[in-house]
Image (tube, helix red, strand yellow):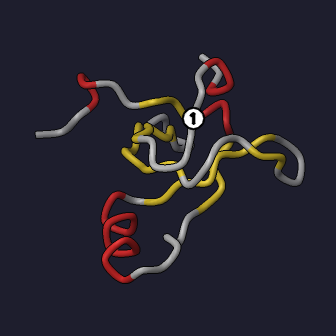
């Protein structure tokens, strides 16, 4: 499923699939943007999102290929 099939915005809870196929819970730092060779979504770990909010700064994130990012649904939530 392509990540472009869903609207992803800043602050959205997403799942990012890594090279081994593992789904990683992340926060989107914005919607899809053009990267060097393909569209990406900038994402960060949940801990970084909350630390940045507490400290009044922008979260540090990494670009992730848009096709490997999807919105998180309730079933994705970890206890």
**Measured from the top left, where is residue 28 in percent x and y?**
51, 48
Q: Is residue 3 left or right of residue 60?
A: right
* Rendered position, 54 above or below 28: below
**Measured from the top left, where is residue 54 in percent x and y?**
31, 77
* Rendered position, 59 above or below 25: below
Of residue 15 and residue 29, the one placed in the foreground of this image is 29
Quarter of the figure that contains the C terminus:
top left
* Rendered position, 35 above or below 62: above
Q: Is residue 13 left or right of residue 8?
A: left
* Residue situated furthest front in the rendering: 56
Identify the element where label 1 is drawn.
Answer: loop
* Residue situated furthest right in the rendering: 37
Residue at 62 percent of width and 54 percent of height: 42
Of residue 12 and residue 60, the one placed in the foreground of this image is 12
* Residue situated furthest left in the rendering: 79
Count of number-bearing discs: 1
**Measured from the top left, where is residue 43 in percent x and y?**
53, 54
Of residue 71 and residue 58, the one placed in the foreground of this image is 58
* Rendered position, 76 above or below 26: above
**Measured from the top left, where is residue 11 in percent x and y?**
45, 49
Residue 19, quarter of the rendered image: top right
How packed mark 1 is, by other alpha carbons closer than 10 Å (few <14, some 14-19, many 20 or more), is many
Residue at 18 percent of width and 39 percent of height: 78
Residue named by callout 1: 8
Quarter of the figure that contains the N terminus:
top right
Residue at 40 percent of width and 59 percent of height: 45
Residue at 45 percent of width and 42 percent of height: 12
Q: Is residue 14 left or right of residue 34?
A: left
């Amino acid at each position: 499923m392509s990540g472009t099939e869903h609207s992803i915005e800043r602050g959205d809870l997403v799942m990012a699939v890594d090279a081994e196929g593992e789904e990683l819970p992340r926060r989107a730092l914005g919607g899809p943007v053009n990267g060097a060779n393909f569209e990406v979504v900038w994402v960060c770990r949940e801990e970084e999102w909350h630390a940045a909010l507490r400290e009044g700064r922008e979260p540090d994130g990494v670009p992730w290929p848009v096709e490997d990012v999807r919105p998180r649904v309730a079933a994705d939530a970890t206890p």
